[in-house]
């Protein structure tokens, strides 16, 4: 059962007026993995998460989270007990102190782990007597993360969990995500921090204008994406390289740069057949994949 999808959507759509924030989304998030959910501002990440948790109603399509229909209000309550969620805006009661907030959450959740709560309080150096409204942005984020990590959920959904964190906080967060995953918790998190995603994610989904443009294991992306820089003894024959798997071609005189999501070997062979005088193949990082895929769309 390890490959079973914990989040599954079919044609999930959410419109605000005539603006489609999420567009016929087919998402499948595997169990026991860390899946990163990337996309530009306004791509629809937060809306997708809110629809999955039943906080926003889908306009069309549907899906399941932990096997429960997202459109079933009663099932949503059960889902929320089994999922720990950190919202993008980290909503907390400003008039409460840190320790009041923690004891309030502790009384709420049956899966609360007091030992983890104490450990994280020490790690995050949170001022327990301070009111939430007096916390810095990074401290609010840390408290919101503590409230999620102190639980023992089946699924962690984190919307921009590193927002406002300093480098020490980010390091701590990444280690916690890996530890949670090793402990059998499925992690689904949105982020704009590609370097962090590259360090911890098993699987990457890139959303653009409400639809998926990339949905693959990170290792597979690393292995299949290549940039091929070519030089010809004549003006670069761009049309010869428009084959399946080619994501982008840039040409300047006799030089050409091809970004391929697959078929790199066939492209190299073609370059040799066309008498290229220089053929250089380089791996491509997630940042470049992201920039190229969202730009094209
Ligand atoms: P970011 O990275 O900036 O947080 P996002 O990918 O999370 O962006 P969403 O917040 O899901 O994007 O927004 C997707 C689209 O839906 C945007 O065009 C946004 O303006 C619109 N939108 C989101 N919430 C609402 C709302 N309550 N009413 C109207 N439009 C909304």
Image (cartoon, rainbow, N blue to C red):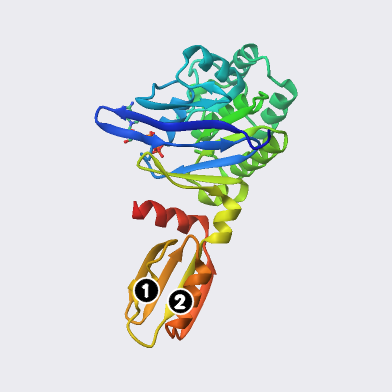
Tell which of 86 and 216 is nearer to you. 216
Q: Earlier in the sequence, mark 2 or mark 1?
A: 1
The residue carrying pointer 1 sits among few (fewer than 14), some (14 to 19) or many (20 or more) residues within 10 Å by Cα, namely few
Label 2 to label 1: alpha-carbon separation: 8 Å
Picture disc at residue 270: 2
Tell which of 142 and 174 is nearer to you. 174
At x 51%, y 17%, the residue is: 76
Residue 21 visible in rendering? yes
Is 128 displayed left or right of 140 in the figure? right
Residue 20, percent across and down? 31, 34
Is 134 displayed left or right of 142 in the figure? left
- Tell me the SS state at disc 2: helix
Residue 141, percent across and down? 54, 32
- Tell me the SS state at disc 1: helix
CB under 8 Å between callouts 2 and 1?
Answer: yes
Residue 139, percent across and down? 55, 31
Is 152 displayed left or right of 247 in the figure? right
Residue 161 visible in rendering? no
Picture disc at residue 240: 1
Q: Is mark 1 within 8 Å of ligand 1?
A: no
Which residue extends farthest right?
115
At x 29%, y 28%, the residue is: 16
Asked if residue 92 is positioned above or below residue 31 in the image, the reply reads: above
The residue carrying pointer 2 sits among few (fewer than 14), some (14 to 19) or many (20 or more) residues within 10 Å by Cα, namely some
At x 54%, y 60%, the residue is: 224
Which residue extends farthest bottom?
233
């Amino acid at each position: 059962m390890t490959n079973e999808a914990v989040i599954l959507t079919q044609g999930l759509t959410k419109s605000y007026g005539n603006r489609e924030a999420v567009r016929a989304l087919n998402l499948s998030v595997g169990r026991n993995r860390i899946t990163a959910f990337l996309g530009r501002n306004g791509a629809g990440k937060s809306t997708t998460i809110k629809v999955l948790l039943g906080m926003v109603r889908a306009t069309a399509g549907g899906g399941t989270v932990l096997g429960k229909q997202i459109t079933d209000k009663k099932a949503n309550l059960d889902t929320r007990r089994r999922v720990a969620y950190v919202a993008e805006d980290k909503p907390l009661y400003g008039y409460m102190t840190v320790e009041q907030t923690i004891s309030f959450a502790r009384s709420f959740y049956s899966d609360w782990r007091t030992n983890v709560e104490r450990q994280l309080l020490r790690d995050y150096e949170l001022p327990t007597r301070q009111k939430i409204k007096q916390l810095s942005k990074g401290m609010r984020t840390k408290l919101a993360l503590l409230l999620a990590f102190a639980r023992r959920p089946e699924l962690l959904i984190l919307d921009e969990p590193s927002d406002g964190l300093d480098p020490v906080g980010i390091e701590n967060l990444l280690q916690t995500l890996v530890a949670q995953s090793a402990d059998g918790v499925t992690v689904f998190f949105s982020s704009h921090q590609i370097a962090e995603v590259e360090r911890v994610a098993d699987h990457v989904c890139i959303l653009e204008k409400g639809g998926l443009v990339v949905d693959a294991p990170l290792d597979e992306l690393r292995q299949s994406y290549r940039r091929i820089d070519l030089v010809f003894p004549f003006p670069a024959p761009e049309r010869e390289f428009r084959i399946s798997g080619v994501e982008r071609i840039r040409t300047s005189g006799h030089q050409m740069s091809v970004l391929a999501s697959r078929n790199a070997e066939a492209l190299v062979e073609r370059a040799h057949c066309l008498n290229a005088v220089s053929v250089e193949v380089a791996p491509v990082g997630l940042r470049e994949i992201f920039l190229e895929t969202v730009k094209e769309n």
